[in-house]
Image: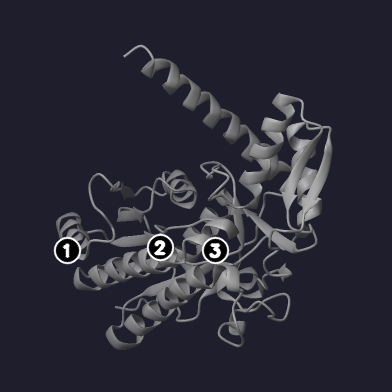
């Protein structure tokens, strides 16, 4: 039932982080280690989150007290634009299975993680929570956005009809340790890190950047996001979703230059305007979460340095595994 007496204590609770191997899920797990709670995880080898029966059976057996729903099929513009059915189906069925199973198993509290892409392409900037469903979405990621909007509405519906203490949070563009660096499915920060790193190693004189470089974006370091999610889980209980942002924005061209400097690439940038830009600007209005007492702490410069370190470790690990497998 809805807990009107916030804060909600995580101490001593069994907490399921759905999607614990993803960038956000792993960051949530890192920070939950400080909360004196039991962290529950289940990889794909244990349950397919798209299988309703498997999800319900696992949750009945494990009986979590709280759930962070961070599991999702995610990707950048190219992945969204070329795999619309996957992005719509996978995300709809994952969130539906987990939210409904949470209700059946009397989960005390659930946090649904969405995305800033839920807002209209031409929404007034910065985008406040009430901008939702006021005009058309950005076409390149509308399938993912529709699924996330459905998740928000499902949490609201279960709250209204059954009194479930389910809340939703919408972070802006995330990056950091545990990111996806595959160029066909990654978001802009990891894609740029990999491009500039490989160009530096090859001694390439130029790096191609998709689009005009003009769109403006706000970026949130993933550990800041995890901090906000845990803070909201403890201190927020209401129907409306809550934005999570850093409050700072930068053009894609400016971001490319910042990543280039972080990586140590000294060549030139070439902008390929045959590729789409996406929404012209995406800045969140974070008045609500600021008034609740939370704000981001990690700036873009520090965040990019940490993200690049994570990429280097990822490369080292993959090379080590390749070397080991060659002796099998």
Q: Position of residue 130 (x, y in %)?
A: 59, 84
Lower sequence index among marks 1 and 2: 1
Along the viewing direction, whichever of 51 and 223 lies nearer the viewer = 51
Along the viewing direction, whichever of 153 and 62 lies nearer the viewer = 153
Q: Position of residue 59 (x, y in %)?
A: 21, 59
Label 1: which secondary element? helix
Query: Is residue 50 rendered to the left or right of residue 306?
Result: left
According to the picture, the residue beneath numbered tag 1 turns out to be 53
According to the picture, the residue beneath numbered tag 2 turns out to be 86
Q: CA distance from mark 1 to mark 2?
A: 20 Å
Q: Residue at x 73, y 34 (%)?
A: 263
Nearer to us of marks 1 and 2 is 2
According to the picture, the residue beneath numbered tag 3 turns out to be 81
Label 1 Cα crowd, 10 Å radius (few <14 / some 14-19 / many 20+): some
Is residue 194 depicted above or below 58 in this figure?
above
Q: Residue at x 41, y 74 (%)?
A: 151
């Amino acid at each position: 039932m809805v807990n009107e007496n916030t804060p909600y204590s995580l101490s001593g609770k069994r907490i399921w982080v759905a999607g614990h191997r993803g960038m956000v899920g792993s960051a949530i797990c890192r920070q939950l280690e400080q909360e004196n709670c039991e962290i529950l995880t289940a990889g794909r080898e244990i349950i397919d989150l798209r299988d309703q029966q498997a999800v319900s059976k696992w949750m009945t057996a494990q009986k979590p007290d709280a759930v962070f729903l961070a599991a999702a099929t995610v990707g950048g513009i190219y992945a969204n634009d070329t795999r619309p059915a996957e992005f719509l189906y996978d995300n709809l069925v994952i969130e539906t299975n987990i939210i409904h199973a949470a209700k059946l198993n009397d989960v005390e509290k659930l946090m649904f993680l969405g995305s800033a892409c839920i807002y209209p392409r031409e929404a007034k900037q910065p985008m406040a929570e009430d901008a939702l469903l006021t005009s058309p979405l950005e076409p390149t990621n509308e399938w993912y956005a529709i699924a996330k909007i459905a998740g928000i509405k499902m949490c609201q519906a279960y709250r209204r009809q059954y009194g479930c203490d389910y809340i939703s949070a919408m972070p802006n563009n995330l990056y950091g340790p545990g990111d996806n660096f595959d160029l066909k499915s990654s978001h802009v920060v990891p894609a740029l890190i990999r491009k500039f790193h490989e160009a530096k190693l090859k001694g390439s004189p130029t790096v191609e950047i998709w689009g005009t470089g003009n769109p403006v974006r706000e970026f949130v370091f993933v550990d800041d996001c995890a901090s906000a999610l845990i803070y909201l889980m403890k201190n927020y209980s209401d129907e409306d979703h809550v934005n999570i942002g850093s409050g700072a924005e930068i053009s894609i061209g400016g971001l490319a230059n910042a990543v280039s400097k972080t990586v140590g690439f000294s060549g030139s940038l070439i902008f390929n305007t045959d590729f789409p830009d996406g929404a012209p600007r995406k800045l969140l209005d974070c008045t609500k979460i600021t008034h609740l007492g939370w704000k981001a702490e990690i700036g873009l410069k520090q965040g990019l340095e940490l993200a690049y370190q994570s990429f280097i470790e990822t490369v080292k690990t993959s090379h080590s595994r390749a070397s080991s497998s060659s002796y099998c």
